[in-house]
Image: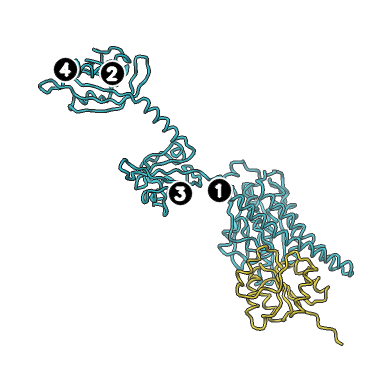
Amino acid sequence: MDQGLYRQVFEGMPGYVTAQGRNMRLLAANDIFRHDFGDGVGRYCYEVYKGRSERCPVCPVEKTFADGRVHRSEEIIRCRGGEEVSVIVCTAPIRDVSGEIVAAVKASTDITEVKQLQEKLRTLFDHVPCYISVQDRDLRLLEANARFKTDFGDALGSPCYEVYKHRSERCVSCAVARSFQDGQIHQSEEVVTTLDGRQENVLVRTAPIHDAKGAITSVMEMSTNITELRQLQDRLTSLGLLVGSVSHGIKGLLSGLDGGIYLMQTGFSKAKPQRVDQGFEIIQRNVDRIRSMVMNVLYYAKDREVTWQSIDLEQISASVGGVLASRAAQLNVDLQVSAPAGAFDGDHNAVHSMLVNLLENSLDACRLDKQKQGHHARLEASVDGDHVVFEVSDNGIGMDRATRERAFSLFFSSKGAEGTGLGLFIAHKIVVSHGGSIAIDSEVGEGTRFLVRLPLQRPAAQEIERSGGPQMQLDYEDQPAT
Amino acid sequence: MAAAQPKLILIVDDDPDTVAYLSAWLEDNGYDTLSASDGRQGMDAILAHGPDLVLMDLKMPNQTGIELYKEIRQQSGLAALPVVILTGTTEFELFGDGCALLPAPTARIDKPPDLTALHQIITRALTDS
């Protein structure tokens, strides 16, 4: 090829082509370069390409001069008009007849459009409303989108099970591993833990990524957060259970009211005053039970705001005792209530309901106990430092460990006829909403003691939060008794 | 002619109000009654007093109505004892699970009971037995 043709090829190259000497000064430049950067021959390449006043820290031309090989790099250069262009740079040596490197040729190909597309895809990858990661065969994270990194940390290189589930071993069933195994798309539902400890339900889908030869090199995992959906499902399930539980309870109460009315009616017509009294007591008791059940349902159905007021300790204790006196007498349980003079802050109706629930539980525990001759239930209030303490105790049937652990679970009831599984759950919820605590001490055959501690004065909102929200444990296995 | 001895009905229910109600109503209708508050007490009462009919709830502490029913039907001499189930549970299938191989109870009536229907059931059961 003659020199003219060489020149033509050089000028017509579809990219920026320059030749430069060891001192980085441009020796020649092609047509496109001159068009975008001006005639820079004689000037330093870093000046012309990048507007710099000194050499670039990493320079492919310098490397080519040093080792005589071809070098590549990715750079951003700035045209005459100030416009930035992303380029892939390739440098090669030019030797003289003796083989000595006298210059280097530098060809820069504009990849701005490719970079823009890459950027666009990266933005989509980062902002897609789910967690995306790419994993290798050891389940190590090779890539993760921004949403993933925000919630689980920038943990590239760590195993997925460590990052997602804080586990030290692989999960038993792993959709990523299955995709590696059979090359298919797999799906699973998982519970993952975020950096700040939130538990989230995610729907996971995995798909293999193949290389040019069709071999699986990695697997992409896409996890959609379905926590709200699951919460809604749980809520609907619990509402269904509530309706069932309340219906059962109402049937029992209706029986009681029917019975009371029958006894009063026939007591009058047969002139049996004792029967009238008995009927009246039954009606009164069942009306109290309806009131208590309605309060529980209201407390369950809605997170009620606490209406803070000053509560007279003696008055509320006596009132709770009064509500349950007739029931205790009917069950032949010796009920004693004691409280010192004093007052504390709280929601009167809520605290009243909570104590009625606990004491009702004690009376039921006595009713169910067939071992002892005499039974007693106690409500004892006291003041301990800056807390009011309610101790509700009985010598009834007692609880085994399993019952004790599930006592505050929603819809758990070990009772026979009357358990709706709401009472102790609500009692716990009320105590927590007051920033207090509740503990159970119980032995089978011995009896049970509930210890409730409430702050004497209204606590700050954050202290109530610290005492923990009510444990929403649904107990699907034990349906409330009829 | 001497008056017929009143029939004895055993009420097994853990709710004292229900027991008070049914006892009074049955006695008003010419029956003698006795009561038990769980399945275990119920079985003791059956063996001790030999009632003519058992009216019982399904879910109770200690021994449930289902267990009691099983025991009654498996006890020689009690196979024909009329048993009426009075329950508030809507899941009567519960009963089937525990007693699949046993004959069905004499009758079943929901709580709160319709007294006319209950009276008919008891009269028929006692006549048939």
Q: What's the distance in space between the residues labelled 2 and 4, CA to CA? A: 32 Å
At label 2, which amino acid type do we have?
A: Tyr
Chain coloured yellow in this rendering: B
Specify the subunit that label 4 lies on: A
Q: Which residue is mark 1?
A: A230
Image-based side of A427 in relation to A25, left or right:
right
Q: Which residue is mark 3?
A: A187
Q: CA distance from mark 1 to mark 2?
A: 59 Å
Which amino acid lies under the numbered mark 4 shown in the image of this protein? Asp
Q: Are marks 4 and 3 in contact (CB under 8 Å)?
A: no
Cα gap from disc 4 to disc 3, whole angstroms = 65 Å
The span from disc 1 to disc 3 (Cα, nearest Å) is 17 Å
**Total of numbered circles in the picture?**
4
- In the picture, the disc for residue A2 is 4
The mark lying in front, picked from 2 and 3, is 3
Q: Nearer the viewer, mark 4 or mark 1?
A: 4
